[in-house]
C-alpha cells in the first residue's frame, strides 16, 4: 500500500476546510441545533470508518488491532447515540434537552474505549512499569486540578443535584480517557503515533471541556459560538483518526521493544503548571500574607527540587545513551561473530547462549538455554571435561584452552576449540564463560595429515614410522613378524604396476583380517610387510606366521586371473628395546633360503 503524504491528503484537507467553514456559518446563523447534530453524526461515522481502516491495516500489531476494533465498536455506539438525538430533533426541532438514550450510548462507547486503553499492554516490567504509572498519575492529577479550578468547582456549586452528578460523571469519564491516552503515550507501546495521539487527546478532551473553559475565560458565548466550540474539537479528533490511518505504517517501522527507559517531561510540566495555578489562585483571593509567604516558599522549594531532578534526569539519560550504545555494539559483535559464547553454571546448565549457537550446533540460542552441556559432550571427552573442571577450580578467573566434541543438531559431533573462564564471582556474569570456535574442519585436516604421516597411502596399513612408535611405546614383551612376498616381482613385471598394487592391497586386507585387538600390520615398502604382536610369545607368533604364509599363498582373483604369491615370514621375540625388526629380517631371509632349497629339492631329477 503506497504511503500517502499527509499534507496532500484530500480527506484531511477536507476536514480542515469543514473546521474553518463551521466558524462563520454558525456565528451567522446562530443556534442551528439540528444542523449541529447532523454534522456531529457524520463526524462520528467518519471516525468509525477511519478506525476500521486502521484496525485492518496489515502493519498493525495483534494488540493494536484489538485496541482499534474496540475503538470501532465504541465509535459505533457514538454514531447510534448522536444519530438517535438527530432523529429526535428532525421530528421536533424545538426540542432542547438531550435524550437519556443518547447519553447512555455515548457513555457506553466511551467506556469501551477506556477499557481498551487501560488493557493495552504497557511493555517493560517491574520498576519501569511502576514509573509509568507514577508519571501518568502525576499528569492526570495536574489535569484534574485545572479542571476543578476552571470548571467543576463552579459548576458543582451552582447546579442542581442531578446536574452535579452529570457533570461529575462527565468529568470522571473524560479523566479516564485522558489517563488512558497518557498511559499509552508514555509507555512507548501505543497503537498510534505520537502526533495522532496528542491530536486525538486534545479533540476528545475538548468535546467536554472547551465550552465551559472558554465561557470561564471570556464570558458567555452566543448560541452559534457555543456550537462552534463544541464541534471544532470533534473535527480535530476526526482529523487525528484520519492522520493515524495515514501514519499506521510508522508503527511497523518503529521498534516495539516496549518502554524505552527514557523519562517523560510531562510530569514535571504538570507540577510546574499546578504551582503556577496555586500562585494565581492566591493572588486572586483575599489570603493572609503569612499563608502567601508559606505558599511562595513551597513553590520556590518545589522549583529548586525540580531543577535538581531535571539535571539528574539529563545525566541519567546521557548515561543511558552511552550504555545503550555499548550494549548495541556488544549485541552487534555477538550476533555477527562466528564464535559461540556460553555462560554455564557449575553443573553444566546453559544460562546464556549467543546467536552463533545455530551456526555452530544447529540449535537456536533460546532452545540451548536451560539444557546441560554434559548431555551434549562426546562420551570420549568426559576425562577432558573433568580435567578442565579441576584446572578451573585451581585457576579461577584464568582462561583455559581445551578441545572438546559437542553434539550437533544433526546427531554428529563437532570439534570445538574452547577457552573457558570462571567468572562466577563477577556479579555481572555469575557463571563460567565459554568461548568456542568450530574446529571440525581443522581437526579433520589435522587427522588426515597425521594419518598420511603414519600410514601407507596404497594399502592403508601403518608405515615404518607408526610401527617404530608403537614398538617403542610398548611396556611388555612383543613379537615381530617380517613378511616378504615371493613371486611378486614376476607379477609386477608381467602384468604391470597397477595389477601389482592390487596384489599388495589384497595381501594387506588378508593380513588385517587375521589380527586381533592391539596387533598392528604395517607395510615397510615394496613387497615387505611387518606385524607387531604385543604380549605374544615366540611360539604363538610362529603359529601365526605359518597361518599368514598359508593365507597369503591362496589364489587371488585379480583382473580376470587367479594370481598366486608366496610369503616368507621371519619371527623374532623379545623386549621393545631389542632390535626385533632386524632379527625378524634375518629370520625372514633364512626362511626364504629354506623355501628356495625346498623348491630345488622337489624339482631335482632322480
Image: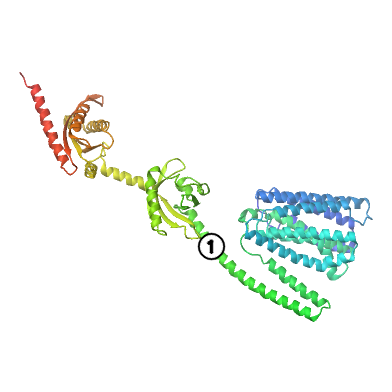
**Screen quadrant of the C terminus:** top left
Where is residue 297, by image quadrant? Answer: bottom right
Residue at the farthest top position: 606
Above or below, 263 relative to 302:
above
Of 500 and 77, the residue lying toward us: 77
User: Residue 142: x, y in percent?
Assistant: 74, 66
Q: Is residue 470 visible?
A: yes
User: Residue 173: x, y in percent?
Assistant: 79, 58
Report crowding for label 1: few under 14, some 14 to 19, many 20 or more residues within 10 A (C-alpha): few
Image colouring: rainbow
Of 323 and 375, the residue lying toward us: 375
Image side of residue 40 versus residue 535, left or right: right
Residue ID for mark 1: 325
Residue visible at 65% across and 54% down in the picture: 251
Q: Is residue 7 visible?
A: no
Above or below, 497 relative to 399:
above
User: Residue 389: x, y in percent?
Assistant: 40, 52
Where is residue 31, by image quadrant? Answer: bottom right
Image side of residue 548 versus residue 49, left or right: left
Of 112 and 499, the residue lying toward us: 112
Image side of residue 213 versus residue 440, left or right: right
Circle 1 — which element? helix
Of 7 and 496, the residue lying toward us: 496
Residue visible at 68% across and 63% down in the picture: 134
User: Residue 286: x, y in percent?
Assistant: 84, 78
Residue at the farthest left position: 606
Image side of residue 400 versus residue 267, left or right: left
Badge count? 1
Amino acid at each position: 500500500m503506497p504511503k500517502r503524504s499527509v499534507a496532500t491528503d484530500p480527506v484531511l484537507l477536507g476536514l480542515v476546510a469543514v473546521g474553518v467553514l463551521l466558524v462563520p456559518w454558525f456565528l451567522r446563523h446562530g443556534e442551528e441545533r439540528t444542523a449541529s447534530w447532523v454534522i456531529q453524526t457524520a463526524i462520528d461515522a467518519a471516525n468509525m470508518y477511519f478506525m476500521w481502516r486502521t484496525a485492518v491495516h496489515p502493519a498493525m500489531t495483534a494488540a493494536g488491532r484489538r485496541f482499534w476494533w474496540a475503538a470501532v465498536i465504541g465509535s459505533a455506539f457514538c454514531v447510534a447515540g448522536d444519530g438517535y438525538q438527530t432523529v429526535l430533533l428532525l421530528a421536533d426541532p424545538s426540542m432542547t434537552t438531550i435524550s437519556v438514550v443518547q447519553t447512555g450510548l455515548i457513555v457506553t462507547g466511551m467506556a469501551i474505549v477506556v477499557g481498551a486503553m487501560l488493557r493495552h499492554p504497557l511493555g517493560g516490567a517491574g520498576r519501569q512499569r511502576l514509573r509509568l504509572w507514577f508519571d501518568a498519575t502525576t499528569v492526570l492529577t495536574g489535569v484534574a486540578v485545572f479542571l476543578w479550578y476552571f470548571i467543576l468547582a463552579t459548576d458543582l456549586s451552582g447546579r442542581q443535584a442531578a446536574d452535579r452528578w452529570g457533570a461529575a460523571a462527565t468529568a470522571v469519564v473524560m479523566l479516564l480517557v485522558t489517563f488512558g491516552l497518557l498511559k499509552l503515550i508514555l509507555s512507548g507501546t501505543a497503537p498510534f503515533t505520537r502526533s495522532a495521539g496528542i491530536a486525538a487527546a486534545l479533540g476528545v478532551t475538548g468535546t467536554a471541556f472547551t465550552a465551559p473553559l472558554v465561557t470561564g475565560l471570556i464570558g458567555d458565548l452566543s448560541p452559534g459560538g457555543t456550537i462552534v466550540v463544541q464541534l471544532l474539537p470533534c473535527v480535530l479528533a476526526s482529523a487525528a483518526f484520519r492522520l493515524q490511518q495515514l501514519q499506521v505504517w510508522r508503527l511497523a517501522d518503529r521498534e516495539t521493544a516496549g518502554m524505552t527507559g527514557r523519562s517523560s517531561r510531562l510530569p514535571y510540566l504538570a507540577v510546574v503548571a499546578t504551582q503556577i495555578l496555586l500562585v494565581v489562585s492566591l493572588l486572586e483571593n483575599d489570603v493572609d500574607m503569612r499563608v502567601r509567604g508559606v505558599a511562595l516558599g513551597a513553590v520556590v522549594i518545589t522549583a529548586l527540587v525540580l531543577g535538581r531532578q531535571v539535571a539528574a534526569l539529563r545525566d541519567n539519560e546521557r548515561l543511558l545513551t552511552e550504555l545503550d550504545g555499548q550494549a548495541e555494539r556488544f549485541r552487534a559483535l555477538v550476533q555477527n561473530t562466528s564464535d559461540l559464547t556460553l555462560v554455564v553454571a557449575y553443573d553444566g546448565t546453559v544460562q546464556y547462549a549467543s546467536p552463533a549457537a545455530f551456526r555452530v550446533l544447529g540449535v537456536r540460542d533460546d532452545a540451548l538455554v536451560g539444557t546441560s552441556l554434559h548431555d551434549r559432550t562426546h562420551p570420549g571427552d568426559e576425562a577432558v571435561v573433568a580435567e578442565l573442571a579441576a584446572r578451573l577450580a585451581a585457576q579461577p578467573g584464568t582462561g583455559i584452552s581445551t578441545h572438546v566434541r559437542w553434539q550437533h543438531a544433526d546427531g554428529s559431533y563437532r570439534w570445538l576449540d574452547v577457552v573457558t573462564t570462571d567468572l562466577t564471582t563477577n556479579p555481572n556474569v555469575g557463571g563460567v564463560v565459554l568461548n568456542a570456535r568450530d574446529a571440525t574442519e581443522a581437526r579433520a585436516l589435522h587427522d588426515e595429515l597425521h594419518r598420511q604421516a603414519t600410514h601407507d597411502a596404497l594399502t592403508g596399513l601403518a608405515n615404518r614410522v607408526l610401527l617404530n612408535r608403537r614398538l617403542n611405546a610398548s611396556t611388555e614383551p612383543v613379537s615381530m613378524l617380517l613378511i616378504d612376498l615371493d613371486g611378486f616381482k614376476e607379477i609386477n613385471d608381467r602384468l604391470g604396476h597397477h595389477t601389482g598394487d592390487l596384489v599388495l592391497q589384497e595381501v594387506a586386507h588378508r593380513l588385517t583380517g587375521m589380527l586381533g585387538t592391539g596387533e598392528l600390520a604395517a607395510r615397510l615398502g615394496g613387497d615387505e610387510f611387518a606385524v607387531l604382536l604385543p604380549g605374544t610369545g615366540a611360539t604363538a607368533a610362529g603359529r601365526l606366521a605359518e597361518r599368514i604364509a598359508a593365507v597369503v599363498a591362496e589364489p587371488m582373483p585379480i583382473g580376470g586371473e587367479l594370481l598366486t604369491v608366496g610369503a616368507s615370514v621371519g619371527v623374532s621375540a623379545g623386549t621393545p628395546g631389542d632390535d626385533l625388526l632386524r632379527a625378524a629380517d634375518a629370520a625372514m631371509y633364512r626362511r626364504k633360503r629354506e623355501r628356495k632349497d625346498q623348491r630345488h629339492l622337489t624339482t631335482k631329477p632322480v
